[in-house]
């Protein structure tokens, strides 16, 4: 049976996962908001080139290594990490798997924030788990 969580529970798990990261990472995360949506929008699908049911998360913004000295000299729209609740739940059998998947997707998208490529993220995730 597939587990399900309310949006509030899902957000709480994502916040806990973020707080479990080493301080050397969390202290460098600036002007990023983490949001939960049920499914990706058409715009998100176009940006990611993924399907509506397979996209689990998406980072949108200016990766940290690409922020020049100009960044922050004027109000900047926050970067955004979106976690797609229904898609994550669909690939999990229970709440424990959902929690693990939320952590994995969040860490993957934070890797993009830090300017890592897909290959670098996968390598780092293998080392982490």
Image (tube, rainbow, N blue to C red):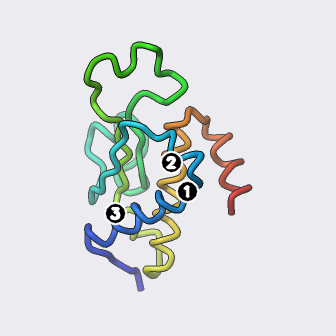
Q: Which residue is mark 1?
A: 21
Give the x, y percent position of residue 25. Answer: 56, 46
- Looking at the image, residue 7 sits to the left or right of residue 26; the answer is left
Asked if the residues shown at circle 3 and circle 1 are in contact, with their CB atoms under 8 angstroms apart, the answer is: no
For residue 120, above or below residue 84:
above
Residue sitting nearer the eye, 114 or 54:
114
Residue sitting nearer the eye, 43 or 61:
61
Residue at image location 51% in from the left, 39% down from the top = 28
- Looking at the image, residue 123 sits to the left or right of residue 97; the answer is right
Q: Secondary structure at mark 2?
A: helix
Packing grade of label 1 (10 A; few <14, some 14-19, many >=20) is few
Q: Secondary structure at mark 1?
A: loop
Residue at image location 55% in from the left, 56% down from the top = 21
Q: Mark 3 or mark 1: name the one nearer the start of the chain.
A: 1
For residue 63, above or below residue 14:
above
Q: Mark 1 or mark 2: name the one nearer the start of the chain.
A: 1
Give the x, y percent position of residue 94. Answer: 45, 82
Q: Which residue is mark 3?
A: 85
User: How many tags in the picture?
Assistant: 3
Asked if the residues shown at circle 1 and circle 2 are in contact, with their CB atoms under 8 angstroms apart, the answer is: yes
Q: Which residue is mark 2?
A: 26
Give the x, y percent position of residue 91. Answer: 46, 69
Q: Mark 3 or mark 2: name the one nearer the start of the chain.
A: 2
């Amino acid at each position: 049976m597939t587990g399900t969580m309310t949006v509030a529970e899902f957000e709480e798990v994502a916040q806990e996962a973020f707080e479990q990261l080493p301080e050397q990472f969390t202290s460098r995360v600036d002007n990023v908001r983490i949001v939960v949506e049920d499914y990706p929008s058409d715009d998100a699908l176009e940006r990611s080139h993924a399907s509506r049911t397979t996209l689990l998360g998406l980072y949108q913004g200016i990766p940290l290594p690409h922020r020049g000295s100009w960044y922050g000299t004027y109000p900047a729209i926050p970067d955004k990490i979106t976690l797609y609740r229904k898609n994550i739940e669909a690939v999990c059998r229970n709440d424990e798997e959902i929690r693990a998947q939320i952590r994995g997707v969040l860490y993957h998208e934070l890797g993009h924030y830090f300017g890592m490529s897909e290959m670098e993220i996968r390598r780092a995730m293998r080392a982490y788990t």
